[in-house]
Amino acid sequence: MADTATPNVIRRADYAPPAFLIDTVALEFDLIPERTVVRNTMRVRRNPDASHASNFELMGEQLEFVSATIDGAPFAQAHAHEHGLTLDNVPDSFELTLTSICNPAENTTLSGLYVSGGNFFTQCEAEGFRRITYFLDRPDVMATFTVTLRASKADYPVLLSNGNLLEEGDLPDGRHFARWEDPFRKPSYLFALVAGKLVALEERVKSGSGKEKLLQVWVEPHDLDKTRHAMDSLINSIRWDESRFGLELDLDRFMIVAVSDFNMGAMENKGLNIFNTKYVLANPETATDTDFANIEAVVGHEYFHNWTGNRVTCRDWFQLSLKEGLTVFRDQEFSADMAGGATDEAARATKRIEDVRVLRQMQFAEDAGPMAHPVRPESYVEINNFYTMTVYEKGSEVVRMYQTLFGRDGFRKGMDLYFKRHDGQAVTCDDFRHALADANGRDLAQFERWYSQAGTPRVSVRTQYDAAQQRYSVTLTQGYGDTAPAARETQKGPLLIPFAIGLIGKDGHDLALQLEGETRASEATTRVLEFTQTEQTFTFVNVAQEPLPSLLRNFSAPVIVEYDYSADQLAFLLAHDSDPFNRWEAGQRLATRELLTLAGRAATGVPLQLDDSVVAAFARVLTDETLSPAFRELALMLPSEAYLAEQMAESNPAAVHAARQFVRKRLANALRKDWLAVYEKHRTPGAYEATPEASGHRALKNLALSYLAELDDPAEAVRLASAQYDAANNMTDRSAALSALLNASAANGGSVEAQQALDDFYRRFEKEPLVIDKWFALQATQRGSAQRPVIEIVRKLMAHPAFNLKNPNRARSLIFSFCAANPAQFHAEDGSGYAFWAEQVIALDAINPQVAARLARSLELWRRFTPTLRDGMRAALEKVASQVKSRDVREIVEKALA
Ligand code: B3K
Ligand code: ZN
């Protein structure tokens, strides 16, 4: 039911258990693109824990009803309607067979059963199964599934579904069949099937307890050479979940299938994960270091769902973060362990920094706007709109806080108890919290507020040093500041905030920590304070000198810290803090403050200038050989334009762009020699290696190149970039060179070198859709100029033969890249960006509501912008609101305008 005039609000408070339960499901598919027949036989019984209902209501969408039988006899009292099927006066326990027809060939929503590249795929989470057959399509109804697939053998030689293959064979008329059985009870959202012309990379491994497992990565034949990294990532994920959490793969076979038309990243269907090609396919020529890292993370994420999501699932969709927050936390820890093991804190910190950067830029923004919601939302109109940064990323921070409070061992104890209690069940976020609390002998009632309050908490810090008494007191105050109305309604009281702190002495070393009342100082020089009241003072004793506080080390809670550091103090922390995260943080604070001052000046036309001390602080990082290249790259990267604009009282993307460009140019010109030296020193000649070290070198080298491209005279950068482009043996270096060429020529309205490289890039990779996505994205995110606005380039590219609005990756590469990742151009004063946005949201709404709703979100913060932009944004939102039909987009634009 994607189309409706008055969308219904679904509320968490209205949860009621299902009136009926389904114990077993036997599905039979006759796969034909335009007309697939589905026969569904279920064992149904009344739920003893629910109130009596005489009718059995099944969900169904876009289905053609054919017939119903109960216990083998035709059942006449079945009524199909727009939302499903009603069976009147059913017995207490019965076998129900339903036959229906769907049309996968015409299914452009990519939800349910659909055709992509001539093959069949499914996507059922959250509510796609009801587009395949009538069902109790809700996660607290768990059944065992047997699936029989029948199709033309020539067209669909491979037939896959969840679990284990029971039998396969030929049928008359060139057809064949396969029968699969999944021994584990599961909700319908974890069902999957795949049929088509695919090939697999296979590997057999032994699990921890010695059982043999078959692993397969299925792709189209021409992509087989890009599957090795995904397979390695899967094997590493299996090993990691065994060693870190004692969790073993429970099936004999585990399959990953790549599909190029997919709404999101990937899907954790039991034993048959279906992935966007973007998160499977990689070789050095086609994928960047970032792609390699993302593939490892997403393969891990989906694999880890097998326990956190599938074995223990969600009672209802309000509990989504139960599986998503927890599984994001697990994939983040997996990536950190892969990069730095358990002990290399600096290497682990690079992953932490990247994750926190995303959280701050995206989740904090979400929490400040009309879509703000708690980690466990109270209501929704369309559940697909709640696969959000808050549920995923803030949810993962909430899980991380348990580990920060209880340590790795305490967290593991809690996880063990969670599985002991709930394996095979559909449960709630409260159940998870209780397991963590009970395993650690703690009352975590107050911690529940992290699940129920929206908005980003602010912690302000005051410090006082008493030299005579050698006491240092730290007073923390928590609140939410001026948050969005949507968030304010949910805020009830103070949170339990694990606040990690260290004290740094004049020589840059950590001081010993002894809190008042303790008999001696602890060995650890970082202390996690449990901050539970609105205002609370923690006093350290035996503090022989006035320290500099290092606050919220390793970002121990998803909050904003307010403390009045001087620029000198930040430079000192950047040079000395033993907590690598906070070293980076100090540089970001310094840069953010400077950039916001400059943006304020740019907005009012005052000339810009940058203090030499800031340049000196950056120079020290650039030349500090004791720091890893990966860390230096992160520390030298300025905060993004979107993040900076969000920090302004009135967001002004043009002013932010001017300020950030000014600083980049200044750093480029002032440190030219150093950038050149770093560029030369961190080249990685020889065969490509995907190790964290090698990718750190490339990252720093390519950052240097991007700064060199800002030089007043970019000739040297153009020469280096052209040479790098031609010589590159990997996509990281080739795309970075192309980007540098585009940016170096932006001021002059483009250059021959940039155009030649773009043309060459297209020709070289014409047959690699994921690389052509990069080609579109690089152009959509390039810097524009008054003579050459990027909107004109984007509009031209919309007409390129390789552009296809129906393919989500392609739509994202051009449209989303421009609307969400090129703020200075998108927010052009003439409103051209907003007009384009409205056209595309409306066009996508008719094809794929989920993708359209994502794009719709790029204007949701409109009220925070400068008045001229605000008016243009409102007009565009109103236009969209008056024309779109899907529940998905309507929920977004109506909330934005409310
Ligand atoms: N669970 C899926 C997301 C499904 C999104 C539905 N609109 C992927 C993941 O988080 O692992
Ligand atoms: Zn997930």
Image (tube, rainbow, N blue to C red):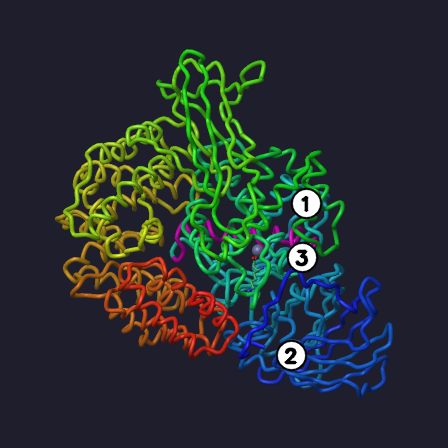
Q: State the residue position of label 3.
A: 314
Identify whether 733 is placed above or below 54: above
292 inside magenta stretch:
yes
Q: Earlier in the sequence, mark 2 or mark 1?
A: 2
Residue at image location 31% in from the left, 75% down from the top: 800
Q: What amino acid is at disc 2?
A: His
Residue 419: percent from left, percent from top: 72, 46
| Crowd band around label 3 with a 10 angstrom C-alpha radius: few (<14), some (14–19), many (20+) | many
Q: Check the image and report above or below for 538 versus 17.
A: above
For mark 2, what is the residue?
A: 83
Q: Residue at x 19, y 52 (%)?
A: 604
Name the residue type under label 1: Leu
Q: Earlier in the sequence, mark 3 or mark 1?
A: 1
Per the image, is 707 magenta?
A: no
Does residue 842 appear in this view? yes
Tell me where the magenta segment starts and ends, as one range. 286-315
User: What is the residue that sits farthest to the top in this orientation?
Assistant: 468
Q: Given this view, does label 2 or label 1 mark the residue nearer the observer?
A: 2
* SS class, disc 2: loop
Q: Secondary structure at mark 1?
A: loop
Horizontally, is 815 left or right of 719 in the view?
right
Judge whether 373 appears above or below 84 on screen.
Answer: above
Whole-number angstrom distance, CA of label 3 to CA of label 2: 23 Å
* Front residue (pair 344, 180): 344
> Residue under circle 1?
247
